[in-house]
Amino acid sequence: MNRIELERLDGLVENLLALAGLQTAKGHERRAPVNLAEVCRRAVEELDPLAALAKVPVELEVPSELIVSGDALALQRAVRNLVENALRHTPAGEKVVVRASPHDGEARVHVIDSGVGMAPEHLPRLLERFYRIDTARNRAHGGAGLGLSIVKAIAESHDGQVEVESVVGSGSTFTIRLPLSEEITREAGAS
C-alpha cells in the first residue's frame, strides 16, 4: 500500500470514529461557552497549507466574539470539514470565504466557494453518509462521503442545522446555524 492510500484510510477511520462518537454521545455532556469566531479562525489556520497548495485564498470575515454553547473541538472539525471541502472544489485563483455572524438569536457560519456548484437534485442527499456526487472526482481527492454528514451530526448535536445553496457554475454556500449562548441572547434582549 502506498502512502496516499494509507492517509486516505487513516482519514476514513478518523471520520468513522467521529461519527460513532457523535452517535453515542448524549450531546450536552461537554458543553461550555465557545467563541465560534475563534473556532473559525483556528479551522482556517489549520488549512493554510492546503489553501496555499491549491492556490485558493481563504478570506475570514468574523466578529471578535460570537458565543455559542458547545464542544469547541467538534465545532472546529465541522468548520474545517466545510472549508476543506470548499478548497477541494474551488479552482486555483478563486477564493473561499468563511463568514460568521449573529442573526435572530443564532450564530451562522457561512462557507462560500466559487467552485463548480451542484445540480439541485443532489442537494437533498448531500449531507447523507457516503453520498458522493461524482465518485471518480471524489475518489481522486480521497473523499468517502463522510465529511458533510459529520458536519450535519455535529450541528445537530449542538441543536443546530446545516443548509446548502448551490448554483451550477457559480459555487456553493454551506451554512451552519447554531443557537447563540443563552447568556448572550438574554443580554441582547435586556438592552
Image (cartoon, rainbow, N blue to C red):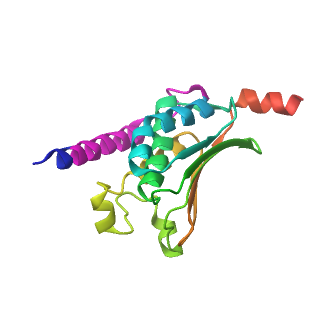
Locate residue 99: give its quadrant. top right
Q: Which of these two is toward me, 136 or 59? A: 59
Q: Is residue 39 inside the magenta stretch? A: no
Q: In terms of depth relative to the viewer, which is nearer, 67 or 113? A: 113
What residue appears at the point 57 percent right and 68 percent down from the top-left corner? 170
Image: magenta residue range: 7-34
Name the side, left or right, on which 19 lies relative to 174.
left
Occupied quadrant, residue 184? top right
Q: Front-most of 44 and 34? A: 44
Magenta part mainly helix, strand or loop?
helix
| Quadrant for the C terminus in the image | top right
Residue 35 in the figure: left or right of residue 143 = right
- What residue is rendered at 32% in x and 55% in y? 143
Q: Position of residue 172 (x, y in %)?
A: 55, 61
Whole-percent x, y for residue 135 in the image: 31, 67
Q: Residue at x 37, y 63 (%)?
A: 131
Instruction: In the rendered view, tell whether residue 171 sits above or below residue 168.
Output: above
Q: Is residue 78 above or below residue 115?
A: above
Compared across the picture, whether 132 is left or right of 105 comes to left
